Amino acid sequence: MSEKNFGAVRDNPARSRFELEIDGAIALAEYRVDDGVMTFFHTETPPALQGRGAASKLIHEALLTARERGLKVRATCSFVIAYLKRHPEFADLAG
């Protein structure tokens, strides 16, 4: 499945997470916001979505949302840490 076939990433503030639903499965990235910093502490991708780029799409859109909101980003989740290392275009978000 190519990225263009993914649905939209949505912020679910009631559950403090971003979600990406594909074929009935939901990849998610949990966060909290304190003092202008969005901290990503957990990313979860169901087995059916692993290896399809879902988590990367999810984090990419979540980071764009943080930027649009004027938030800095901190990552304690290993996936988000690795993503940020691979994508220096988000270095301005480091908080």
Image (spheres, rainbow, N blue to C red):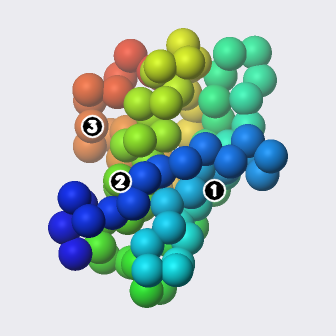
| Among the two numbered marks 2 and 3 on one chain, the one whose residue lies closer to the N terminus | 2
Find out whether the residues at labels 1 and 3 contact each other: C-beta distance under 8 Å: no
Q: Is residue 82 in sight in this rendering? A: no
Q: Work out whether 39 lies above or below 11.
A: above
User: Could you tell me if residue 20 is visible in this image?
Assistant: yes
Q: Is residue 94 left or right of residue 28?
A: left
Q: Is residue 39 above or below residue 34?
A: below
- Distance of label 2 from label 3 (alpha carbons): 12 Å
Horizontal and vertical percent position of residue 44: 57, 67
Residue 12 vs residue 70, the one in the foreground:
12
Secondary structure under tag 1 reads: strand
Q: How crowded is mark 2: few (under 14 residues within 10 Å), some or many (20 or more)?
A: some
Front position in the image: 32 or 61: 61
Q: If the image is split into quadrants, where does the N terminus sit?
A: bottom left
Q: Disc 2 vs disc 3: which is toward the camera?
A: 2
Q: Give amino acid for label 3.
A: His
Residue 27, image x and y in percent? 52, 66
* Residue annotated with mark 2: 57
Residue for badge 3: 87
Using a 10 Å C-alpha cutoff, classify the residue at mark 1 as few (fewer than 14 neighbours), some (14 to 19) or many (20 or more): some
User: Residue at image x 65%, y 35%?
Assistant: 39
The answer for how far apart the CA atoms under marks 1 and 2 are is 15 Å
What amino acid type should be assigned to the residue bearing mark 2? Lys
Task: From the viewer's perspective, tell me whether residue 54 is left or right of residue 46.
Answer: left
For the point 49% across and 30% down, which residue is it?
A: 65
- Residue type at mark 1 is His
Indicate which disc, 1 or 2, sits on the residue closer to the N terminus: 1
Q: Residue at x 35, y 55 (%)?
A: 56
Residue that badge 1 annotates: 42
Q: Residue furthest bottom?
A: 48
Q: What element carries label 3?
A: loop
